[in-house]
Amino acid sequence: MITKQVILKKDREKSANNRHPWIFSGAVARVEGDPENGDVVDVWNSRARFVARGVYNDKSQIRVRLLTWNPNDPIDEQFWQRRVSRAVAGRLALKQNQNTDSYRVVYSEADGVPGFIADVYGPWLVVQFLSMAVERHRRTILNILVDLMEPQGIYERSDTDAREKEGLVPVAGPVWGEVPPDLIEIVENGHTFLVDVKLGHKTGFYLDQRENRERISKYFEGKEVLNAFSYTGAFSVYAAHGGATRIINVDSSERALQIAERNMLRNGFGGRDDVYAVADVFDILRAYNEARWKFDVIILDPPKFSFSKRNVEKATHGYKDINMLAMKLLKRGGVLVTFSCSGTVSRDLFQKVLFGAAVDAGRTVQIIEQLSQGSDHPILLTCPETEYLKGFVCRVW
Ligand code: SAH
């Protein structure tokens, strides 16, 4: 019998009624039953009616992470079993794909497991527990995953700031089975990549770009390409395979570029005239413009520039700057593939930023394709925050 309740303010019920999974501290009128952080609580509206059930955490701005809107749904092992099984079932087509062995199998709120991420890298799983809600149930969730996925081992990469916002200490290391090697070899659309699961970004690889990489492969035949923010060179391998004559990779991380070079070699593109430049993209775009260099194709896949609603404006200046510089660097009829992975920058806003960049660059720019995150990173309609990756393929005249 649950006796712990969070009662909502009268004018702050709408979002929970619409099945958004976050109750912010400002929406809470009262807390009853003295819940501890990590405890399951029932959320009631001001008329003492059940709204939803979730996990309480007073260390986080998100006071309750809602898990179910069904009053008869206890948060027990079967509950997590149903949620994780559903996520796994949604990836069946990917699991059976012979050309790809790596994908996101559980994506947080989008799969109804708020704060939990599990990525498949061949026989290995790399996981993140980023909220108190899932931290409290970590053993249960891991056991379910072991049963469903039968991995060789599970490695945890919860070493992110997100945990601090929940009052949790960042952690990383092996959590089940064998310990993966430092570099795991994976296959994506028939290409092989080394993935640095222990020290790389996020869980090691940008799985969310898989479908975009394949989709833009057609633009590279006979082209000179600038891959800015290249990380471990995933786009470059597709570009070389698509017939690119020369690829300039630019990233601030030397380790990422070393792996990029090894990835090119592994796919049969060693010993070419490609460049791996450790540099700041902002600086190098300016330097190339001063030197009047021109490219056929430019890929811009920067890290997140905006971390909250408060710094969106500053972030848009960064996006405008690099896009304007890149547009100027393209030959007439060249192709710009440009992304924003900032959740707080909407597709509309990103398009407006590109408009400003085109005007300032003095170039005529057409959008020829629109890109999003891969199908293994679903967007939950009731939680628009699950959408973060926006991309445009532009023809620049
Ligand atoms: N396109 C890549 C992912 C890019 S992630 C892929 O498909 O795998 C963003 C990359 O930008 C990271 O590798 C990070 O090291 C790099 N980075 C961040 N700020 C940078 C800057 N100012 N200049 C150059 N690289 C930067």
Image (spheres, helix red, strand yellow):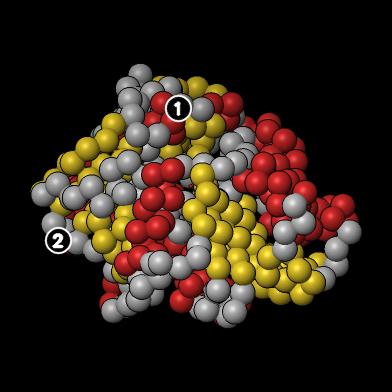
174 left or right, relative to 314:
left
Q: Residue at x 54, y 32 (%)?
A: 24
97 left or right, relative to 387:
left
> Which residue does the numbered mark 1 point to in the structure image?
165
353 left or right, relative to 162:
right
Residue type, numbered disc 2: Glu
Position in image of residue 168 (x %, y %): 35, 26
Position in image of residue 331 (x %, y %): 76, 69
> Where, quadrant-wise, is the C terminus in this rendering?
bottom right
In the foreground, 11 or 314: 314
Q: Is residue 104 visible?
A: no
Element at badge 2? Answer: loop
Q: Residue at x 10, y 49 (%)?
A: 177
How crowded pointer 1 is (Cα within 10 Å; few <14, some 14-19, many 20+) is rated as some
371 left or right, relative to 140:
right
Q: Residue at x 39, y 44 (%)?
A: 255
Q: Residue at x 68, y 33 (%)?
A: 311
Position in image of residue 351 (x %, y %): 75, 58
Residue type, numbered disc 1: Lys
The part of the image, by quadrant, that contains residue 304 is top right
| Most distant residue in the left direction | 177
Q: Earlier in the sequence, mark 2 or mark 1?
A: 2
> Where, quadrant-wise, is the N terminus in this rendering?
top left
Q: Is residue 29 visible?
A: yes
> Which residue does the numbered mark 2 point to in the structure image?
150
> Gap in Å between the C-alphas at discs 2 and 1?
32 Å
How crowded pointer 2 is (Cα within 10 Å; few <14, some 14-19, many 20+) is rated as some
